[in-house]
Amino acid sequence: MITVTEKAKSKIIELRQQDGLNDNHNIRVAVEGGGCSGLMYDLKFDAAVQPQDQVFEDKGIKILVDKKSLLYLLGTELDFSDGLNGKGFQFINPNATRTCGCGESFAV
């Protein structure tokens, strides 16, 4: 399962409204090759649920994950930080054995 914090939920709703999107636009989380540590997170809005997707819902937010990415993301929590040390979505991933300094890539 993938979960979201209250801060992430609030920011997702805010961004969805800013972009003029409705509640049918869910969050798609994927893992792609690249970055300093070898794997990178991809996060975007998507209204289309694909046949290979797993759909999770937490705090009223639907999260779409393709089966390949799911192997890397099980148990991950999506958070949002607006502090001095960085602003943006953060992935708290128990599967990651290391992350890069920017927090946008990881290895397993």
Image: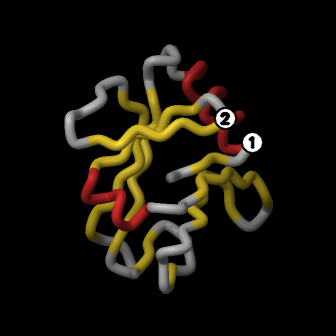
Q: Nearer the viewer, residue 1 or 23?
A: 1
Using the image, tell me which numbered label, if any, was put on residue 94: none
Which residue is most to the left?
51
Residue 83 placement, left or right of 59: right
User: What residue is drawn where x is 75% and y is 52%?
Assistant: 82
- For the residues bearing labels 1 and 2, Cβ distance under 8 angstroms: yes
Q: Secondary structure at mark 1?
A: helix
Q: Nearer the viewer, mark 1 or mark 2?
A: 2
* Extreme residue in the right direction: 84
Are there few (<14), some (14-19), or many (20+) residues within 10 Å of tag 2?
few
Q: Amino acid at mark 2?
A: Lys
Q: Quadrant of the rendered structure where residue 102 is?
A: bottom right
Q: Earlier in the sequence, mark 1 or mark 2?
A: 1
Instruction: Judge by depth and name the residue closer to the eye, 44 or 51.
Output: 51
Amino acid carrying label 1: it is Glu
Q: Quadrant of residue 36?
A: bottom left
- Label 1, residues with CA under 10 Å away: few <14, some 14-19, many ≥20: some
How far across and how far down the image is residue 96, in percent?
48, 77
Q: Look at the numbered disc 2 and give the secondary structure of its residue.
A: loop
Judged left or right of residue 73, residue 34 is left
- Please determine whether, in this image, residue 58 is positioned above or below residue 94: above
Looking at the image, which residue is at 50% across and 85% down?
98
Residue holding disc 2: 59
Q: Which residue is mark 1?
A: 6
Identify the image quadrant of residue 101. Answer: bottom right
